[in-house]
Amino acid sequence: MSGTIFRVSVGFLVGVLALMALALCAADYYTTEQQRLAAAGDPRGALEASRLALRLDPFETDALEAQARALQQQQKYEEAAAALREAIERDPNNYLPYLLLGNLQLAMEDRDAAVESYRDVLELNPKATTASTYMAQTLVVQGKLREAKEEYLKLEREDRIPYDALYNLGRIEVRTGEAEEGLKDIKSARRQARSGLEDLEGPLARQREEFIRGMDLAVADAMVVAGRESGARRILSNSPSEQAPSLLQLLDSDPDAYREQVVNSDIY
């Protein structure tokens, strides 16, 4: 009798495990299907696929992240945030949902909350360069230049700073009393941007070229603040930027006003 009960129990357990395995396989299928539908531009289909994956695997976090992306595409920001918070509850040691939540909060223009989410990412993964750069950029937009500068300097010290972040660091330094250091960093960022230009084509190449033209103006700005008016004049005279002629006129007529304009200007 006891042997029969044991065999029945084992059979039942095997059946349960088999069903669980099938459910997990199906959840993986729907997660993959969600990614395919999202790439195909079908956010509604992607959202439904992620919901099916979640029903089949209650411990899934990838599907919640995918669901949040699909909801964000539909501008359902609060629902997307709720999905990411649920993902965080399920796996609090996974930094990716915090990063996605920070990006979502930026889209919602809740910059203070975004900064806190990026800080959460960095507590879990101090080497998360993306979170560091996003947080620093958000601090720049908030006008918190010195806080942003500290974040950029950490990246620079660890040799992890992308050229666009180095560019921002240089512009901050120009505005916070370190014009020579800022000039050096802006020039370094410009060299890095130029070095990758030949690998780009079409709109990406044009976008990079426009960015580099903006860097040229930033070099001129830094030179003016550093007292190198002749170098700034040379750059502005050769710049194809539409802003260059008016800046050159201001430099010729009132260098101090130009200098003050740069120091007090916002960084975008």
Image (cartoon, rainbow, N blue to C red):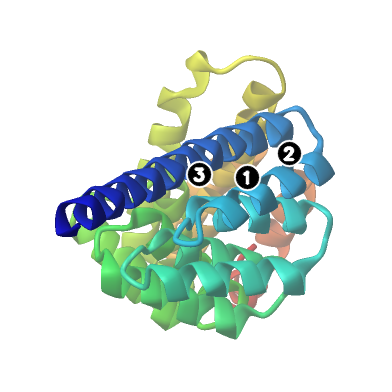
**Residue 67: % across, % down:** 66, 54
Among the two numbered marks 2 and 3 on one chain, the one whose residue lies closer to the N terminus: 3
Residue 201 image position (x, y, % from top left): 62, 14
Q: Secondary structure at mark 1?
A: helix
Q: Which of the two labelled residues, at mark 2 and mark 1, occupies the earlier sequence position?
A: 1
Rounded to the nearest angstrom, the CA distance separating label 2 from label 1 is 8 Å
The amino acid type found where label 3 is placed reads Ala
Residue in the picture at 64% in, 65% down: 104
Q: CA distance from mark 1 to mark 3?
A: 54 Å
- The residue type indicated by label 1 comes to Gly
Q: Are marks 2 and 1 in contact (CB under 8 Å)?
A: yes
Above or below, comparing residue 207 to residue 73 in the picture: above
Q: Earlier in the sequence, mark 1 or mark 3?
A: 3
Check the image and name the residue furthest to the front.
Answer: 1
Q: In this figure, which residue is indicated by the disc labeled 2?
A: 241
Dot 3 crowding, Cα within 10 Å, few <14, some 14–19, many 20+: some
How far across and how far down the image is residue 37, in percent? 72, 32
Q: Which mark is residue 214?
A: 1
Closer mark to the observer between disc 2 and disc 1: 1
Mark 2 residue type: Ser
Q: CA distance from mark 2 to mark 3?
A: 59 Å
Assess disc 2: are there few (<14), some (14-19) or many (≥20) residues with their C-alpha within 10 Å of its C-alpha: some
Q: Position of residue 71 (x, y in %)?
A: 75, 57
Q: Quadrant of the N terminus?
A: bottom left
Query: At 76% across and 68% down in the image, what residue appears?
Result: 77
| Front: mark 2 or 3 | 3
The residue beneath circle 3 is: 23
Residue 249 seen in the figure: no
Q: Is residue 84 left or right of residue 21?
A: right
Residue at screen point 48% across, 58% down: 61
> Left or right of 150: which side holds 239?
right
Residue drawn where x is 46% and y is 27% of the image: 194
